[in-house]
Image (cartoon, rainbow, N blue to C red):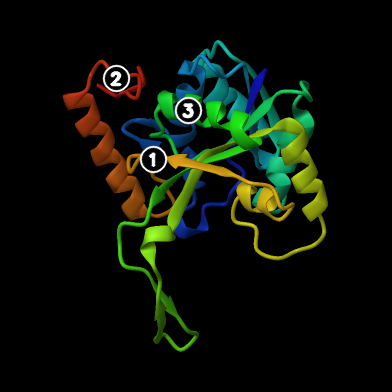
Amino acid sequence: MVSAIIVAAGKGIRMNGKVRKQYLMLAGHPILSRTLWVFNACSAIDCIVVAVPEEDLDFCHERIITPLNLQKELRLVAGGAVRRDSVYNGILAIEDKGGTVVIHDGVRPLVHPELLTACIEGVTETGACSLGLPAFETLKRVNSSGYIHATLDRETIWMAQTPQAFEYSLIREAHEAGKGKGGLSTDDALLVERLGKKVKMIRGSRFNIKITTPEDLAIAEAMLQTSATEFPDSPFISPLISS
């Protein structure tokens, strides 16, 4: 069984607005709604757990989940103080302890269902798989004073994306091993790496952007409208495209 955890418990402070970024409108519909549609459309996904701010549980059920009429089993859980806590709450809410867990950012609504399936299939090699992209810009390490300290070899550098998929037992062990230890934890693959386990990286898509700033939202709008015009039959385009 494959369970998905959609992490949508952030405050969205980089948007500088009163509405959390996961509820902002993208081509006429909330970003989170579009993300959920993609997972609902993916045949490899059996059930979905959505982590949202605790105070938003009723709002999300009434305004986001119910109008979508999703076919997948779905459960809402309260998120935590930080992303890692929200993911762990989602892990605990999964009933099948022997399956695969797919973890995805709620504000990455333009991921293609085929990439979800590829990430899930990648788990068979090492128990952990992440989408990502090879670095396509020159990368600089900069010191605290703002001066270039070094230029990195981008041939070996990838930029991680979500979804990331794991064997349930592995990702739960990774989260519990890292609990209370602090330190930087920007994604779930890092927690697995800290166990000394290998994580398979497969190529994602430049369409699969994370919407965290107003500029990102504008780019996503353009991507969505371009795709709707040029690839109307693609499963990447949801029936939520506004008229």
Which quadrant would the C terminus be assigned to in this image?
A: top left
The amino acid at mark 2 is Ser
* Quadrant of the rendered image containing residue 109: top left
Position of 84 relative to 23 (above/below): below
User: In the image, is 192 to the left or to the right of 235?
Assistant: right
Precedes in sequence: disc 2 or disc 3: 3
Residue at the (62%, 25%) spot, across then down: 61
For disc 1, the marked residue is 208
User: In the image, is 226 to the left or to the right of 81?
Assistant: left
Front disc: 2 or 3: 3
The amino acid at mark 1 is Asn
Q: Rounded to the nearest whole Å, what is the CA distance between mark 2 and mark 3?
A: 17 Å
Q: Residue 234 bears which disc, if any?
A: 2
- Secondary element type, mark 3: helix
The amino acid at mark 3 is Ala
- Secondary element type, mark 2: loop
Precedes in sequence: disc 1 or disc 3: 3
**Residue 105 visible in the snapshot:** no
Precedes in sequence: disc 1 or disc 2: 1
Residue at the (47%, 84%) spot, across then down: 143
